[in-house]
Image: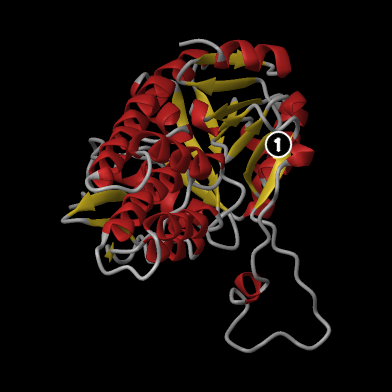
Amino acid sequence: MIASMESRVWQPVATADWQDDACVLLDQRVLPGVERYLRLETPEAVADAIREMVVRGAPAIGITAAYGAVLAYRQAEQADQAEPDQAVLERGFSVLAAARPTAANLQWALNRVRKAAGPPALGAWKRALDAAREIHREDIEMNHAMGRLGEALIEGCAPVVTHCNAGALATGGFGTALGVIREAWAAGKVERVYAGETRPWLQGSRLTAWELARDGVPVTVLTDSAMAQMFRRQRPGWLIVGADRVAANGDVANKIGTYSLALTARHHGAQVMVVAPSSTVDLDTGSGDQILIEQRAGAEIWTAVGEAPPPEGICFENPAFDITPAGLVDALVTEKGVVKNPDRESLAAVMAGP
């Protein structure tokens, strides 16, 4: 059970889990008002949940996809299938891979489960489950490691800024960007956290603020358009964000609005820290220009206005992510180490490490 917002000690958040031969997800669409868990028994249901934002955040998407892959193996092993087992498995993996294209962790997790489980055969789903659980366990360990590495970069005590939600809800637990902020708060290095709403899904106000408030971390929520004014007045020391994919040259794909915040931070003398596990780093993608940016329905924007349909002639553009050039990133924190001012050579060197 999730702790109440009055809690002042960090408590794990059960974002994704495997229970009684099913993937169980905390439905983040209805937080913080309702705590609802969904039980998913097919890879198609898991893919729909990823696509419909039941779960979001690159590491959490990867973990969820891994559990979805287990369900694909279970489907393939059912004796009453009309198709060959391999065809059933491939269909399950295909629908999972297509759920959301930008987060690198999704395909990484599917590849890792497939490698561990091998071809569909009796008992292969159990090997897949072992691999999925290992991905989940490692993610939590990596979050804590990144939290310590990122906290060490912060000097003095000042306000910090974050964007979207890169906390326990977006990972296996603890968080990437919020993991650093949690460690820095415990070390007395954070005065206050400023979080933009993150339109149109409001991950900043609904999720990040909820996580921080339940830990007793002072948090102020602003509209996204008020963030530049806040930088000018409050002079935060760091912008700390997660990532959905990091290209080989250090360009970062993250929630839409990250690029403008990085530009604002640079103008006002704040540093930019990107916190992401090595599974988010995609050395096969040369630069941010090659990253496929997910385009979501315009209805997500219009629903904030009201129930009535938009007038005829209005077009919408609703990219879920943007690209922050590597030149705006002061530090990229992974569990393998910290890359300051990341570029192709320094990023490859850290990724080659243990």
Q: Reply above or below: 301 against 125.
A: below
Quadrant in which the C terminus appears: top left
The residue nearer to you, when weighing 6 against 16, is: 16
Q: In this view, does 109 lie to the left or right of 14?
A: right
Q: Is residue 125 left or right of residue 53?
A: left
Q: Position of residue 281 (x, y in %)?
A: 58, 29
Residue 198 shows up from this direction: yes
Q: Position of residue 336 (x, y in %)?
A: 48, 16
Q: What residue type is labelled 1?
A: Arg
Q: In which quarter of the image is residue 116?
A: top left
Q: Where is residue 328 in the image (x, y as percent from the top left)?
A: 73, 27
| Residue at x 66%, y 87% (from the top left corner) | 309
The scheme the figure's colours follow is secondary structure
Q: Position of residue 133 (x, y in %)?
A: 27, 38
Q: In which quarter of the image is residue 250?
A: top right
Q: Quadrant of residue 82?
A: bottom left
Q: Is mark 1 on a helix, strand or loop?
A: helix
| Residue at x 44%, y 30% (from the top left corner) | 181
The residue nearer to you, when weighing 317 against 18, is: 18
The residue nearer to you, when weighing 134 against 111, is: 111
Q: Name the residue under label 1.
A: 232
Q: In this view, does 152 lie to the left or right of 77?
A: right
| Residue at x 33%, y 57% (from the top left corner) | 76
Mark 1: give few (<14), some (14-19) or many (20+) Cα within 10 Å.
some
The residue nearer to you, when weighing 218 against 84, is: 84
